Amino acid sequence: MVTGLALAVVAAASLGPAWISPWWLLGPGIALVIMMSMHPRTVREFQRAARSVAYYGLGLARLQNRWAGQGRQGEDLRDPRHMYADDLDVFGRGSLFELLSTARTGTGERTLSAWLLAPGQHVDVVARQTAVRELAPKLDLREDLAVIGEDIRSALDDRRLAAWGALPPVAVFRGARLIAFLLSIAGAATGIVWIAGEGIRPFLYVAAVEILFGWAIRKPIFEITQAVNTPARELRLIALLLDRLEKEPATSPALVALRERLRLNGSSATAHIRRLQRLVEWMEWAYNQVFAVLSAPLLWIPQFAMAIEAWRLQCGPHIADWIAAVGEYEALGSLAAFTYEHPAAVFPELLAGPQPVYQAADLAHPLIAAEEAVANDVALGGDTGLWIISGSNMSGKSTLLRAVGLSVAMAWAGAPVTAKSLRLARLQVGASLRANDSLADHQSRFYAEIRRLKAIVDAAGADPQVLFLLDELLSGTNSHDRRIGAEALLKGLLERGAIGLTTTHDLALAEMADGLSARNVHFEDQFEGGKIHWDYRLRPGVVQRGNALELMRAVGLDV
């Protein structure tokens, strides 16, 4: 603005005969031209800085436990029929996914969610752990991936891009590229002859043949040129990420394997994508009104369109794998960021044996701030496959179940867990903590619960074994039916080799422990000075008192 104002002042001062020379306009004019040429780059740098600020702002929010509602929540990835996602708060506001995900592409988000929703194979998850350890201290890499390019999430449709690469070949008759090349040489040569004054007739003959040739291939050429614009733009965005990843050294087997997937015929994926970009840019020269006069006899658009199709046939089948590799990098980067931000978290010991085992020391809920979370020990497997947890309202029973379930999901995704130590077999979590009635599906809460329980029973005995987490089992029916149904259900699960936890307010259900070789544990509270206090510590045995009446009175109900 200052330079423009100076230019205007000098211009005004140079108008009168007694004023300064017009040559004074040269200085601010040159400065204005230089600044205008620098403006696009300045805007790009400003936008990158803004993305960097947002990235670190979200990181600080996670460290200060005010991250809920600020990140990607993965609502579009929810499956209400999943056996634990809704019950354990895997998606949604304040969810595990929001805490973990730093991915910018849809593939990265889907990869991370897939890891959290099903236990990986032992060899794969051990490799992920090694990769996450390597990536954890690489702050510069994670920042670069977070700020490179524009808003990749909104500008990139990775599924459509992969589908374009896998389309069947566009039908252009055999030998068309060679004919187009020869005709372009003939057009150039006869054009030179015409310009040299040797006659226009040869050029017209060639032009007539070119018109017939262009008419014969018009449909496939139009199909190629119309289809390539969006993929070329989106591949440019992918190339920004690929280029950064290709430059990053890697030593862990998983990261080395990912880098190898980003190579084709001895060249990097980035190099192949840049070749496509050049082909598209050169083809678009023909749309310039001045160059169009020269490009027509050279069959410019058909030649480059066929070159683009040749590129797609060679590289297109690999696009999906390139995008998938980026997604895996982003998912690993998300786990690495969590590792870096939670130095007290530990990588669990993953057991390869067939026996269901879960042994945690000082396990805390990962979504609760470290200074607020209360840790407990949990041990399942062997002679004790079931814990029956009794306790008063709000004492921590459901929170413990969710902490156990999330630790399993995180462990078999490849992440560290918020515990002092954790040993566990490959377990499939089955949870019933949040069964809800549904008017649309014409089902009551009790019916929704027993349908989930049926799914858990069906999964038990398979590979991987089931870790069941049942909150207030069969609370939607009378105490007589509840006792009979709960005992039969738990017995069936244990006979199928499953292990798990169940909570109850009904102390009669705690009596089942002896018949099921289960262990009774409980949470309790203290009522002092008209207020209830909880310490959220597990204790052996059955709780001896409830707090329902005290809670009702505390909120002002006359009971």
Image (cartoon, grey):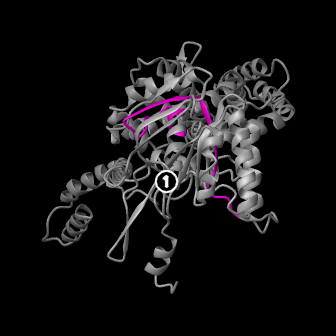
Name the amino acid, label 1: Thr
Residue where numbered disc 1 is placed: 399
Residue at 57 percent of width and 23 percent of height: 122
| Viewer-closest of 138 and 131 | 131
| Viewer-closest of 199 and 89 | 89
Is residue 274 among what the camera can see? Answer: yes
Residue at 77 percent of width and 32 percent of height: 167
**Relative to 178, is 457 above or below?**
below
Q: What is the x, y in percent for residue 134?
A: 38, 25
Q: Quadrant of residue 261?
A: top right
Q: Magenta includes 426?
A: yes
Residue at 43 percent of width and 35 percent of height: 416
Q: In the rendered view, does 63 fall on the left or right side of 462?
A: left
| Viewer-closest of 253 and 6 | 253
Is residue 290 among what the camera can see? Answer: no
Q: Magenta includes 281?
A: no
Badge 1: few (under 14), some or many (20 or more) residues near its Cα, within 10 Å? some
Q: What is the x, y in percent for residue 260?
A: 53, 17
Q: What is the x, y in percent for residue 185?
A: 69, 20
Q: In the rendered view, does 185 fall on the left or right side of 101?
A: right
Q: What is the x, y in percent for residue 291?
A: 60, 39
Quadrant containing the N terminus in the rendered view: bottom left
Find numbered disc 1 in the image and state the secondary structure of the residue it sits on.
Answer: helix
| Viewer-closest of 465 and 271 | 465
**Relative to 318, is 3 above or below?**
below
Span colored in magenta: 409-436
Q: In the rendered view, does 127 fall on the left or right side of 169?
A: left
